[in-house]
Image: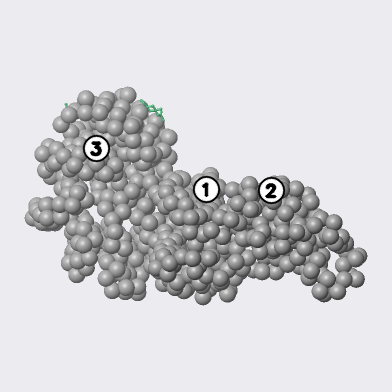
Amino acid sequence: MASARSTTAAVEETAAKTAQSVSNASSTFIDRASRWYADNKVLAWTVAGVTVVAVGGSIYYLSKPPRVSDLDKKSKKERRKGKKDNVKAAEEARQADTPAPAPAPGVNAPKASAEPEAVVEEELPQVTEETVAHLSEQEKKDYSAKLKAAGNKAYGSKDYNKAIDLYGQAILCKADPVYYSNRAACWNAMSNWDKVIEDTTAAINLDPEYVKALNRRANAYEQQDRYSEALLDYTASCILDQFRSDSSAQAVERLLKKVAESKAKSIMEGKEKKLPSPTFVSNYLQSFRARPLPEGLEESADLSEDSGKWFLRKGLLAIQQRTAEGYAEAAQCFDSAVEKNELESHEAYAYNMRGTFRYLKGENDAALEDLNKSIELDPALVQSYVKRASMHLEQSKRDEAANDFEQAMTHNASDPDIFYHRAQLHFILSEFSAAASDYQKSIDLDSKFIFSHIQLGVTQYKMGSIASSMATFRRCIKNFGDKSDVYNYYGELLLDQQKYQEAVEKFETAVEMERKSVGEKGGMNVLPLINKALALFQWKQDYSAAEELCQKALIIDPECDIAVATMAQLLLQQGKVTEALKYFERAAELSRTEGEVVNALSYAEATRTQLEVQEKYPQLASKLQGMGAPAMPGAVR
Ligand SMILES: *[C@@H]1O[C@H](CO)[C@@H](O)[C@H](O)[C@H]1NC(C)=O
Ligand SMILES: *[C@@H]1O[C@H](CO)[C@@H](O)[C@H](O)[C@H]1NC(C)=O
């Protein structure tokens, strides 16, 4: 067959396959970590301001994990290509006609032409447990081949019971993994999953690298909702097959999601609702312009202790500490404020703040109720619409979010927060020119709000106007030279341009400024530390410096999910899979919403499964390591 094709074509195909196997391999286990990081970091920053993330030299800015759909698209094309290229596979698939969605193309039968067609039924031996004992080795060999061929024929005409009987007799003559696997295909056609598992397990025991049997067993496990076992088999099959099969790679993705979703459900049920890391909370809160304490709640105002207003003020002051303790206290104060009431004109604001903190804790429904109540009490408090929009945005309810902005606009068309956050919505939808125009409006209304400027610079960068973007950032440094955020985000854009030296300098400046502004006692924004870690890692592959910086960030903010995810990524890149797993699991623990938990867990599960496969198939370790090497045809069936 190979000789029929031109050498060039064959070489090209090999090259393409190799590239494919490398890209699949890495996208499954290594890049996933980067993307996990990107997804989550963005979830944090979507609501915070800047939504640009530089990992591995590319920018990711996504509001949802895009993995599955990405893969689907790619895979369909590849599958088509694979079919066209691989006549043998197509023929097998046709012949096998396996109805199950399993990626296994079916019976591992030799092609009809390879076997003498004329296996006449009457000539078939009848083998039983008793008669087999009297057969010679040669007879056993001959009989088993004949019985198998007849079995394949019966399978082909969908006479599964007959095929099962024939394969069974063949097995009596010779314990061949292919016979077991073929019989499993019959059980598969009859949806008898227990039997499929039994026969494929026998086949795999005889030949641990039998990809088709692994795929078939995985499908049976999946049919029985035994997702972890299915995932393990599909992962083993992918590694054995060096990621050449799209359907197995797809199955891994699908099962990772299923396993993660079911685990996430139980985690969410038992999960204590608590505030995320102070880094997250600060980032969210500072996406709204700072305001003085409302009239009547000033520090000088004489409020009776334990009244609603007193609690409201106490909460607003606690926020200013920017520490975990401060935020926890604020959350309690806003609860108490609403409970005590006696809030007079501040009732809407109290609901707004309680809703904000409920949202931060991941209590989305309760948060929305509070925001609704706040809007009902005071429709002119437009911040409530804007916050509700950010909640809708996180739930991917874009129309609702857009509607919130519209309503806010009817109440006050000159509030810069509205334009800033509407710009965020445009940005996430990649509507960059609309975003830029809204950021500019926000700046025109209030030029003191630093994040409009920063985000405008990032948007210009995304539009390809690098020079304008850099100019915007230089202007920012002039006007907001005392704010660490400018240096941090400027550094990210420099890092994205691989201007490592300059990027690291900017991150260092940001770290210094954070340190000075809060002292060493905490409340420091750790993002510049993490960015510096990433820069050193990308620039010099300096793992130990990068890890050290992440550890520092974790000492300052132990619950910072971004630092945890970055550690996981660094460890995974060094092949420290066991340690990476711990960090992925920790990241899942720290996640706020079910979606984030699912996302984190699917990475944890991918890592864990890889580890389990390596333990189960020690001979595969070298294959995993040499994944970049050209595919070895013939290494697997
Ligand atoms: C909040 O109000 C909106 C529209 O006014 C409504 O669609 C939504 O169901 C409400 N949500 C909650 C949680 O009450
Ligand atoms: C609209 O918002 C701006 C900025 O927050 C504020 O100064 C102004 O008083 C608001 N107008 C009304 C009518 O509330």
Could you say where residue 28 lies in the image, as x and y percent from the top left? 45, 60
User: In this view of the protein, which residue sits in the foreground, 390 or 119?
Assistant: 119
Quote the CA–CA distance across marks 3 and 2: 54 Å
The mark found on residue 189 in the picture is 2
Q: Is mark 3 within 8 Å of ligand 2?
A: no
Q: Earlier in the sequence, mark 1 or mark 2?
A: 2
Give the secondary structure at mark 3.
Answer: helix
Q: Which residue: 32% across, 29% down?
A: 374
Residue type for callout 3: Arg
Examine the rendered structure and indicate whether residue 471 appears above or below residue 567: above
Badge 2: few (under 14), some or many (20 or more) residues near its Cα, within 10 Å?
A: some
Examine the rendered structure and indicate whether residue 48 appears above or below residue 369: below
The mark found on residue 422 in the picture is 3
Residue placed under numbered mark 1 in the picture: 261
Could you say where residue 592 lies in the image, as x and y percent from the top left? 42, 48
Could you say where residue 115 lies in the image, as x and y percent from the top left? 69, 63
Quote the CA–CA distance across marks 1 and 2: 29 Å
Residue type for callout 1: Glu
Residue type for callout 2: Ala
Give the secondary structure at mark 1.
Answer: helix
